[in-house]
Amino acid sequence: MKTRQPLQQPQRTAHRRGMASVLVIAILAIVAILLMGSGRMVRQMREEVDLTERLQLRRLEASTGHLPGTAIPTPATAVESEFPRYFDWHTPAVRPAETNVMALVEWLVKEPSLDLMMSDAPTLDATTEATLIDRCRQLPAPSQRLGLICLLAYRGGEQSVAFLTNMVCHEYAGRPIARRDEGTMGMIPELLGFLARKSTEAFLFLQQGRDPLFWESCTLWEVQPNGVFLSPGTTESNLAYHSFRGLAWSARPEVDDLLDDYFEHPEQAVEDHASDGVLDGAYIRHLLRDLELEEATRLAFTDYGAYLSGYSDWRRDGKQRWSAWGDETFAMRKRQAQGGNDRNRSPSEDTPPLSGNAHP
């Protein structure tokens, strides 16, 4: 039997070097694998952080209308210091008792398209309410008044009811207005619904306004079409539609009875050209049963995407009774249109409208 000869010194040295090289390569390979894995983990963590940040930014943009780091149009510095709620979105809302109302008024005049949240609207005494109405009258175009109209609707009284009903029925009678002003005028009946929670006059006005024939008896404004064809009766139907939404916002027991009657007689809703308003009114009632009034208005007027998403989910929910009702009335209207007897002048001919022109 041959015996293995012991390695000579040079051979042992070379063998050890080879083993060391293999060991170093193995260690480097392990380190590389660990680094690659940690790199993937870091990238994944960064992607998750980026996604979280993007979602947070989207929520912030949806709730405020602005992204951090972007310029927010501001009025004079004095107004900024007196009403900081609109400049630092992370600070609590200023309590109405501490709010400089006239500073807010001037901000709303400079930013007339701003959707004032009800939670930010200060209380108004009779003198301040009259001052706001006078300030409105100084603004010639309806769209310039939008912010002030919201404030009067949220916190006003009978003076605001008289001013807004006169504005929509008489002030612009026969006068040409721009398309953007048409959107503001259409919103007035809906905003009157908040005043109708306490005002009988506002409630009775909306009861009349839910019928397009009421608006046909009024001398309304003339819309400058700007190349957009407006079919006859569009304005009247739009005002009737927003009147029904206003009734829903009033949350009066009579509105529950009205909605229930129309639910039992869908053909009557179609005959009264009210099916769209009834369906929206039922959804608003649903919101008011689940949410506080301020949160419901925030959803409807400042978080429009969430409002539409909620409406779609509500319509698709087979357990709630209004889903089939909406499909039935829509089919009735479609048959009327095919038969040439369609008098429903809804803002939408293909699908029931989901909400009003909250952002004219």
Image (cartoon, rainbow, N blue to C red):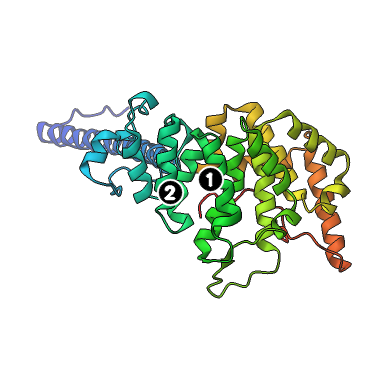
Foreground pick, 122 / 1: 122
State the residue position of label 1.
Answer: 163
Helix, strand or loop at label 1? It is helix
Mark 1 surroundings: few (<14), some (14-19) or many (≥20) residues within 10 A? some
Residue 251 coordinates in the image, percent (x, y): 67, 31
- Marks 2/1: CA–CA distance: 10 Å
Foreground pick, 319 / 134: 134
Residue kind at label 1, given as amino acid type: Phe
Residue kind at label 2, given as amino acid type: Cys
Residue at point 34% right, 44% down?
Answer: 107
Residue 175 coordinates in the image, percent (x, y): 54, 66
Foreground pick, 65 / 278: 278
Helix, strand or loop at label 2? It is helix
Residue at point 61% right, 54% down?
Answer: 169
| Residue 227 visible in the shown view | yes
Residue at point 53% right, 31% down?
Answer: 295
State the residue position of label 2.
Answer: 136
- Residue 224 position (above or below residue 64): below
**226 horizontally vs 112: left or right:** right
**169 horizontally vs 122: left or right:** right
Residue 329 coordinates in the image, percent (x, y): 83, 50
Q: How many marks?
A: 2
Contact between labelled residues 1 and 2, with CB atoms less than 8 Å apart = yes
Can you say which quadrant of the picture contains the N terminus? top left
Mark 2 surroundings: few (<14), some (14-19) or many (≥20) residues within 10 A? many
**340 horizontally vs 357: left or right:** right
